[in-house]
Image: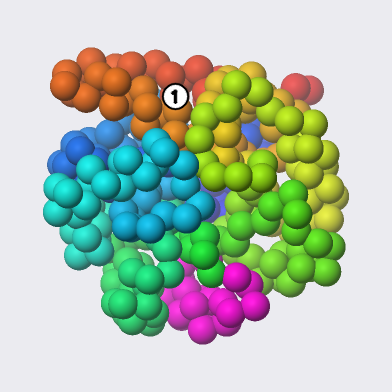
Amino acid sequence: MSRIQETFNQLKKRKEGALITFTTLGDPSLRRSVQLARRLAESGADILELGLPFSDPVADGPTIQASYQRALKAGMNTHRALEAVRKLRDKVKTPLVLLSYYNPVLRRGVAGFFRDFAEAGLDGVVVPDLPVEEAEPVSKAGKDAGVNLIFLVAPTTTERRLEKIVKAAEGFLYLVSLLGVTGARESLSALTKKTISRIAKHVEARIPVAVGFGISKPPHVREVIAAGADGAIVGSALIDLYTSSASNPAQALEKVSAYVHTLKAATAKKA
């Protein structure tokens, strides 16, 4: 059983949803991004999603785009991302998921990419620009390496296509909560809740569903869990908070830690 599956199983027993945090590897440096990820795990994050910086992140909004640019400028690359994953795996038992666009995967070689990251201690990979129709070679490489390939679904995903994605999915389904790119929003739309209900009903507990894009506050987390999701993914708001105090690393970590505690508390499911 994978660390991801075991985590969701344990959370289900405790009647909790999963809190999944997203941060960018190498922003503002490799050392500090690893330090931040460790603090997130210590503060209650159930799964750590780590962004591999890319020059053309088409699914991401201004906050994550800016974090990628800072990381690339600081010298972050796939080799150093492997180093970061190794450092984290030495210190935390939390499942580690890498978000990488397809170009870095292809450039390293699909089989080699998954093999290398599996050896470093990675549990899952999200490739946002890889459609399920073209994913078979990547899925095979993931299975061979023991790394879950995590697919995205959206409000516009048709029932027929959803069937294909659910059949191929491992780890959890990443439900994009809105039409647009990543970024903190003030409120969740009715479409988000309707989509969660539709996807959760379709999946029928075969695989957990985690909701991302726009989740930024404890009420958002409570709403998506109450609507039937198994987890909530928070990224842009967390990065914004850390960056706002980046000149004082200790203060930045304390702010982020307090924020994550409030988010995690919101994952408790009502009896």
Residue 113 position, x and y percent, is 33, 74
Residue closest to the eye, 64 or 12: 64
Question: Which residue appears at 46% of the width and 80% of the height?
Answer: 141
The vertical placement of 266 against 196, above or below, is above
Quarter of the image for the C terminus: give it: top right
Residue 59 position, x and y percent, is 51, 52
Question: Which residue appears at 76% of the width and 68% of the height?
Answer: 161
Residue 155 position, x and y percent, is 74, 49
Q: Residue 138 in magenta?
A: yes
The answer to whether 157 appears left or right of 173 in the picture is: right
Q: How many marks?
A: 1
- Highlighted magenta segment, given as a residue range: 131-149
The vertical placement of 210 against 248, above or below, is below
The answer to whether 188 appears left or right of 53 in the picture is: right
At label 1, the amino acid type is Val
Task: Say which quarter of the image contains residue 223.
Answer: top right
Quarter of the image for the N terminus: give it: bottom right
Q: Residue 108 in magenta?
A: no
Task: Say which quarter of the image contains residue 32.
Answer: top left
Location of mark 1 (residue): 260
Question: Which residue appears at 69% of the width and 67% of the height?
Answer: 165
